[in-house]
Image (tube, coloured by chain):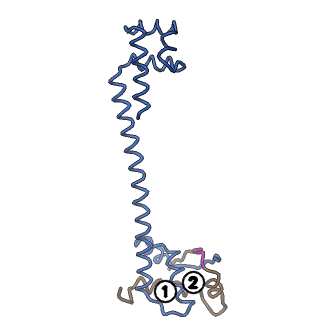
Chain colours: A brown, B blue
Amino acid sequence: MSKSRQTFSLDEHVVSYLQQDHINASGLVNRLVIMYMREEVEI
Amino acid sequence: MTKVTSVNLDEDAIEYFQSENINLSAWIRDIMEQRVTGQDVDIKQVRIRELEREREDCVLRIERIDEQLDELRDRQEAEEYVEEVEATFGESIIKLDKEFQAFPTETRMRRSKAFKRRAEEEGLTPLEAARKVIAYREAVNDE
């Protein structure tokens, strides 16, 4: 699946969280997005 | 305080957000804030905030459209008024007004030899022409 580099302005503490070694920022964001797209939680 | 970061997003995710008209940056900020602060990700809450933002955007858009509509309608009304005034006074008075812009009063126009000559050329007496030019200016300026 092709990917696109996207840049966001986030609160500093959020960026610090995402930049931790054990966090895969892209993976996490994509997972959250997919969860939302699949409507895994009924809205 | 904000800081910039980049992530690699799947193309279909980006397309989805575009098709749903969702502000991706705001959505990411919202969902990440919940994640970082340890709250369970509540999709309903995220969607409520997204819809609130979308609603605010729509309200602002309507306000901007209304402003443009008001402005255009005012301009249209003004143009119609000027056309109406011009039709009422006729071409000769409009020409005299343009030619004698430097003469602000009826008296100044009537004292001018050039004005007398031009008024007669237009088939009017200098008094009649000067009064009509002044009335025309007042009507246009009333707009």
Tell me where the magenta segment starts and ends, as one range.
Answer: A5-10
Q: Nearer the viewer, residue B66 or A12?
A: B66
Q: Nearer the viewer, residue A40 or B99?
A: B99
Whether residue A6 appears in magenta in the rendering, the answer is yes
Residue B74: quadrant of the picture: top left
Looking at the rendered image, the quarter that the N terminus of chain B falls into is: bottom right
Whether residue B132 appears in magenta in the rendering, the answer is no
Mark 2, residue position: A26
> Disc 2 marks which amino acid?
Ser
Establish if B77 lies above or below A35.
above
| Residue at x-position 51% and y-position 21% | B104
Q: Nearer the viewer, residue B1 or B124?
A: B124
**x and y percent of residue B100 in the render?**
50, 17
Mark 1, residue position: A32
Position of B19 with respect to B32 (left or right) is: left
Q: Chain of mark 1?
A: A
SS at mark 2 in the image: helix
Q: Residues within 10 Å of mark 2 (few under 14, many from 20)?
A: some
Residue B21: quadrant of the picture: bottom left
| Residue at x-position 66% and y-position 86% | A16
Q: Chain of mark 2?
A: A
Earlier along the polypeptide chain: callout 1 or callout 2?
2
Mark in the foreground, 1 or 2:
1
| Residue at x-position 49% and y-position 14% | B107
Q: Residues within 10 Å of mark 1 (few under 14, many from 20)?
A: some
Looking at the rendered image, the quarter that the C terminus of chain B falls into is: top left
Q: What is the magenta segment's predominant secondary structure?
A: strand
